[in-house]
Amino acid sequence: VMIFSLAKVTGHAACRIGWALVKDPAMAAQMHRYVLLNSMGISLESQTVAAQILKSTADDPVNSCITYACKVLEDRRDRLALALKGHPEFELLSEWGLYAWIRGKGDTSDTFMNRFGILGRPGNAFGVGDEFFRLSMGASNQIFDELLSRLNNS
């Protein structure tokens, strides 16, 4: 089973559109029945927005929102890595994605977040140790720039 969400692909979380690829027809039928019984359906607005997003992406993949988002995330990842170079006690672990995983060498996630006044998710929320934490790379430009400012000015 592979489950997808338009929000994860394009960043349009308000659409609430998703789909699944299911190899087993019996499992697919059970999943279909579950969705029908446990949802009120998909709003026409969400369907329209999803169709427009997918059409624009298919019509012009070079200038699509997906390409734009990838460029923004790559730029942010590079800028975060540069800011963390000034703090060798912290290591950027993830190369890509909407979240940056960071490990504190001898420090806990609370130490990092308190030291810089930054909010993130502690690693223990994801079943890993307290020395790990996760930062969102999908924040607004203003918030992300403030994150970098706090890292660079300490």
Image (cartoon, rainbow, N blue to C red):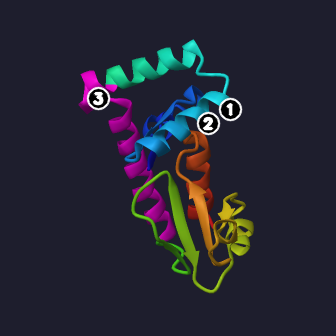
Mark 1 and mark 3 lie on one chain; the one further toward the N terminus is 1
Q: Which residue is mark 1?
A: 38
Disc 1 + disc 2, Cβ < 8 Å: yes
For marks 2 and 3, give the one nearer the viewer: 2
Q: Amino acid at mark 3?
A: Asn
- Disc 3 element: helix
- Is residue 80 found inside the magenta-colored segment of the image? yes
Q: Nearer the viewer, residue 25 or 99?
A: 25
For marks 1 and 3, give the one nearer the viewer: 1
Residue 147 image position (x, y, % from top left) = 60, 54
Identify the residue shown where x is 61% and y is 50%: 146
Badge 2: residue crowd in 10 Å (few <14, some 14–19, many ≥20):
few
Badge 3: residue crowd in 10 Å (few <14, some 14–19, many ≥20):
few
Q: Which residue is mark 3?
A: 63
Identify the residue shown where x is 64% and y is 72%: 127
- Vertical placement of 16 versus 26: above or below? above
Residue 54 image position (x, y, % from top left) = 37, 25
Image quarter of residue 152: bottom right
* Any part of residue 123 in sight: yes
Q: Which residue is mark 2?
A: 34
Residue 76's tag is: none
- Vertical placement of 14 versus 112: above or below? above
Q: Amino acid at mark 2?
A: Tyr
Q: Which residues are magenta?
A: 57-84
